[in-house]
Amino acid sequence: MDFKQMTRALRLAWWLPVLGLVLGAAAASAITLSATPVYTSHTQLFVSTTDSSSTSDVYQGNQFAEKRIASYAELLTSGELAGRVVDRLRLDLTPGALAGGIEATPVAGTVVLDVSVTDPSPERAQAIAQAVGAEFIDLVQELETPAGSTVSPVKVTVFGAADLPGSPSAPRPLVNAAVGAVLGLLLGAGTAVLRARLDRSVKEPEDAAALSGAPVIAVVLKDEELKDQHHIEPHSSSRAAEAYRQLQTNLQFLDVDQPPRVLMVSSSVAGEGKTTVAVNLAITLAEAGQRVAIVEADLRRPRVTSYLGLVAGVGLTHVLTGQADLDDVLQPFGDGALTVIGAGPAAPNPAQLLASASMASLLAKLRTDYDYVIVDAPPLLPVADSTGLALLTDGVLLVVRHGSTTQDQLKQTRATLERVGAKTFGTVLNIVPPRDEISSTYGYDNDYAAEPTPAPAG
């Protein structure tokens, strides 16, 4: 996934980082409020040698003390020292628990040890820090005094008296909330990127074209008007209407010498909006002055007649089985430029009917009588009805639903059409969210409505 894809993933799922930020800050704040405040008292210990009669002795003593510093830091946090402090102050703590609250850090390049003691009580933290200094001096004296001698060559001095902390050292509400917010933001952003990476649906026109093997000749935005009534109103200026006009224009230039006239509109699976595309393409072509016939060839789930408010009782199956003539089932729509042939009653053998010689003869007659014939066919993957039908048309217009059709489905659809030698001449990326980046790429985020006509001067 490149930077552009990551940016797009974050833009589309912007709510995930925001949600992570809010939840991270809230979680950190909740943990902070439930945590017991602790206080830290600080003191400093100075390590030196007792033999300093000359400059060279002082230098050697400092070198000796510096080498001892790291060992003394470990000694300060040992259970031995903690046990002595527990006994000295008569604390209700184990040496291990007390040692966990003591921290000793050598100051680089010096013979100084920074000691900090953390405890829920500020007074007890100060008392423990003072006791640590006193007990450490005694412990060093014992460890460093040579056998047979009463004087230790190492001297430890407390020169930074333990302070009484006035405010808790932890928890820190603002810092914790900020850290939680940042971690939540990063987790949310990572989730958004991972979600996009695992998403196998088709969302980019480039991907749709590459997977289908045909160029994207229209991008149709999600439109509430189409959701309710499935077809655009005559001369509508909606974004969806403009998209269908672009589709109609692009169809005429797909092949200048032999433009497709009998078009099968289908999709990979159901629910991708192929019938809505077929209906509105037919309406747009008729609006442009073309004589158009739309054939409701989805015999299993016919939708064309219901979308257009026409009679669904008679239609294609009657003609294909010889029970009616073509003229008997034609239904005009609108001003008469669009003619509809409904599916008719359900048939037990839809695949055979749609690939029959009768269907070929019907399409040949319609080709003679109309400028365009739009065939609304069943989806290609669930049933075999459209496979043979595709060979009787000039080509297939494949409808791909944005964020729903998967890459594997589109690959399989392409393979199905190529296997029988059918031609896919174009792809429609359908039901694209208006806020998607594609809408701005295709200029759909700009309103270019007609200017109102000025009133005549009177």
Image: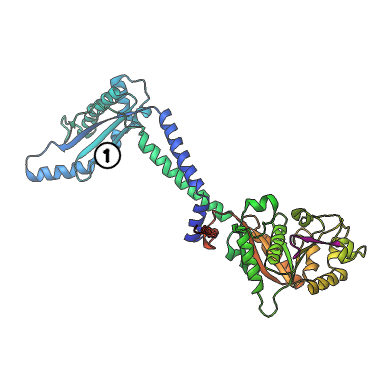
Q: Position of residue 237 (x, y in %)?
A: 60, 58
* In the foreground, 51 or 411: 411
Q: Position of residue 64 (x, y in %)?
A: 18, 43
Quadrant of the rendered structure where residue 343 is? bottom right
Direction right: furthest residue: 323
Residues in magenta, as a range = 329-337
Direction top: furthest residue: 90
Q: Secondary structure at mark 1?
A: strand
Q: Residue at x 84, y 71 (%)?
A: 360
Against 366, residue 172 (above or below) is above
Quadrant of the rendered structure where residue 424 is? bottom right
* In the foreground, 345 or 174: 345
Quadrant of the rendered structure where residue 113 is? top left
Against 215, residue 20 (above or below) is above
Direction left: furthest residue: 54
Q: Check if residue 206 falls in the magenta segment.
A: no
* In the foreground, 155 or 456: 456
Is 197 situated left or right of 299 in this image? Answer: left
Q: Position of residue 106 (x, y in %)?
A: 25, 40
The answer to whether residue 291 is visible is yes
Pointer 1: what residue? Answer: 105
Q: Residue at x 29, y 20 (%)?
A: 89
Badge 1: how crowded within 10 Å, few (<14), some, or many (20+)? Answer: some
